[in-house]
Amino acid sequence: MGLFKWARTRSPWIIHFNTGGCNACDIEVMATLTPRFDVERFGIIIRGSPRHADMLVVTGPVTRQVKDRVVRVYEQMPEPKLVIAVGTCAISGAPFIGCYNVYGGIDTVIPVNAYVPGCPPKPEAIIDGIVKLIPKLRAE
Ligand code: SF4
């Protein structure tokens, strides 16, 4: 069990979810995962299933269409799990706040552990946000 926890908290696997943004944040998240930034040195790997992920990386404001889906994805992740809001939309919903179909930031529907501001944020900022959460993953 100790070895399992040691391995898990030293290689945070992430899953990415766009809840309704303009896709520029998604392009930055994808750029972050390219060999240019070498995130595998931190053990960061993107996964396709929430059941294999430690961190949920969310971009975009929460829309009515995806609210239930993002909550379901969050609930399917094993404990301990952390959420990182990437971009101004995921943080507060802006500039889409006030639209009839937008709830706001991701913390209106699930708990958020880290916020990476920017429109869109640079890959360096996204990496910084994920790496800063690793000690929290160990503590949990
Ligand atoms: S924060 Fe900016 S770049 Fe990111 S999804 Fe929102 S509008 Fe697009």
Image (spheres, grey):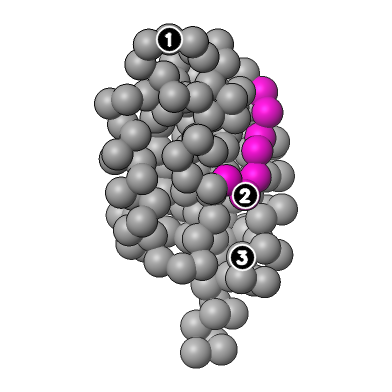
Can you identify the residue that label 1 sits on? Answer: 99
The Cα atoms of the two marked residues, 2 and 3, are separated by: 10 Å
Q: Residues within 10 Å of mark 1 (few under 14, many from 20)?
A: few
* Residue 29 visible somewhere in the drawing: no
- Badge 2 marks a residue whose secondary structure is loop
- On screen, 53 above or below 10? above
Question: In terms of image quadrants, where is residue 89?
Answer: top right
Residue visible at 55% across and 65% down in the picture: 11
Identify which amino acid the numbered label 1 is placed on: Cys
Question: In terms of image quadrants, where is residue 112?
Answer: top right
Residue visible at 30% across and 49% down in the picture: 72
Q: Earlier in the sequence, mark 1 or mark 2?
A: 1
**Which sits in the foreground, 99 or 25?**
99
Is 117 part of what is drawn in magenta?
yes
Q: Is residue 115 left or right of residue 52?
A: right
Can you identify the residue that label 2 sits on? Answer: 113
Residue visible at 47% across and 45% down in the picture: 110
Q: Earlier in the sequence, mark 1 or mark 3?
A: 1
Q: Earlier in the sequence, mark 2 or mark 3?
A: 2
The Cα atoms of the two marked residues, 1 and 3, are separated by: 35 Å
Numbered circle sitting on residue 54: none
Can you identify the residue that label 3 sits on? Answer: 137
Q: Residues within 10 Å of mark 2 (few under 14, many from 20)?
A: some
- On screen, 111 above or below 94? below
Residue at mark 2: C-beta within 8 A of ligand 1: no
Q: Position of residue 136 (x, y in %)?
A: 67, 63
Tell whether label 3 touches label 2 (CB within 8 Å).
no
Magenta residues? 112-118
